[in-house]
Image (spheres, helix red, strand yellow):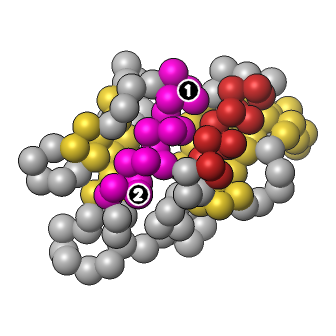
Amino acid sequence: MFSHVMVGSNDIAASKKFYDALFAALGGPEGVIDPKGRLFYMSKTGIFSVSVPINGEAACHANGGTIGFAVESPEQGDAWHAAGVANGGTPCEDPPGIRTSEMGSMYLAYLRDPDGNKICALKRM
């Protein structure tokens, strides 16, 4: 459904350190910075990117917004979460774990990146 997702950052170097660690935990490649200073992570299913806002204003996070990343297991999600915390992320929501709702059982782990963007690792059980 999606071709790409882009979040804003006020510090591309801090974002690169953070997201390189997250994507390494998922078996993904290191990010690439293009000539305009934007950071890209490419996979078979889409592109995740980080950019300083083009309007010159400060980057801010979306209140109520969350970007989810698929993980293959709770263990991979735990590694993803630990890598994020060790590289400038902040835990948020409940601790990582399996939760059951009307949508079924899911493993969820939530973080805020260095700019406050809320992200989540998810595995449908």
Q: In terms of depth relative to the viewer, which is nearer, 83 or 92?
A: 83
* The magenta stretch spans residue 86: no
* Residue on which the image places disc 1: 26
Callout 2 amino acid: Ala
Which quadrant, please, contains the N terminus?
A: top left
Which residue is depicted at the point 53% across and 67% down? 116
In the image, residue 112 above or below residue 83: below
Q: Position of residue 68 (x, y in %)?
A: 57, 43
Residue 107, located in which quarter of the rendered image? top right
Callout 1 amino acid: Leu
Callout 2: 10 Å neighbours few (<14), some, many (20+)? some
Secondary structure, mark 2, is: helix
What's the magenta region? 12-27
Q: Predominant secondary structure in magenta?
A: helix
Q: Position of residue 11 (x, y in %)?
A: 34, 64
Q: Please give left or right for residue 58 compared with residue 121 in the image.
A: left
Which residue is depicted at the point 80% across and 24% down? 125
Q: In terms of depth relative to the viewer, which is nearer, 80 or 43?
A: 80
* Residue on which the image places disc 2: 14
Residue 26 can be seen in this image: yes
Q: Position of residue 119 (x, y in %)?
A: 58, 51
Measure the C-alpha gap from mark 2 to mark 1: 19 Å
